[in-house]
Image (tube, helix red, strand yellow):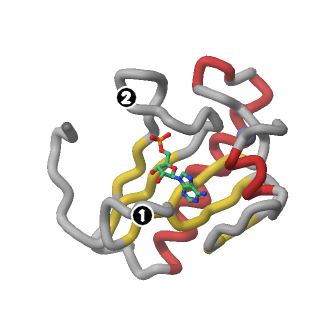
Amino acid sequence: MQDCIFCKIVKKEIPAEIVYENDDVLVFKDIKPASPIHLLLIPKKHIPTFFDLQPEDSKIIGEVQRAAATVARDMGLTKQGFRLVSNCMEDAGQLVFHIHYHMLAGRPLQWPPG
Ligand code: AMP
Ligand code: ZN
């Protein structure tokens, strides 16, 4: 999608600190980290929100979650763990309308979130 900042990162039109990539998924560092480790995991396909998911997208979303485990394992987080969170629409604070999961790690995290 032309005006989508995450699509531009997928197409390498704007820079990002990419930490993992496969055919379906891109993982890069959040520009404004909220924890010592703060990554964004996105499907390469432009899907604005969970409400736009089609049956054929199930595999892609599964691949994003599998990528979370791969990246976390590579970063040595299997014991400490991580939080995977996705903001959907206004009340959740979604700012970028290309589905993404935040991976937060590297410190104890509060629950419930604000
Ligand atoms: P959300 O509020 O869930 O839509 O989160 C959007 C996230 O994207 C925020 O945490 C931003 O800091 C992050 N972000 C926006 N632009 C960029 C960028 N160019 N590179 C990396 N992260 C970005
Ligand atoms: Zn997009």
Q: Are marks 1 and 2 in contact (CB under 8 Å)?
A: no
| Other residues around mark 1 within 10 Å, as few (<14) / some (14–19) / many (≥20) | many
Q: Amino acid at mark 2?
A: Ala
Quick one: SS at disc 1? strand
61 lies left or right of 104: right
Q: Looking at the image, which residue is at 65% across and 37% down?
A: 98
Relative height, residue 37 to residue 68 (above, below): below
Relative height, residue 64 to residue 31 (above, below): above
The residue carrying mark 2 is 92
**Of label 1 and label 2, which has the lower sequence position?**
1
Front residue of this view, candidates 62 and 14: 14
Q: Looking at the image, which residue is at 15% across and 51% down?
A: 110
Q: How many marks?
A: 2
**The N terminus, quarter of image:** top right
Location of ligand 2 given as a quarter of the image: top right
Q: Position of residue 94 (x, y in %)?
A: 47, 33
The residue carrying mark 1 is 38
Relative height, residue 112 to residue 35 (above, below): above
How far is mark 1 from mark 2, CA to CA?
18 Å
52 lies left or right of 100: right
Q: Is mark 2 within 8 Å of ligand 1?
A: yes
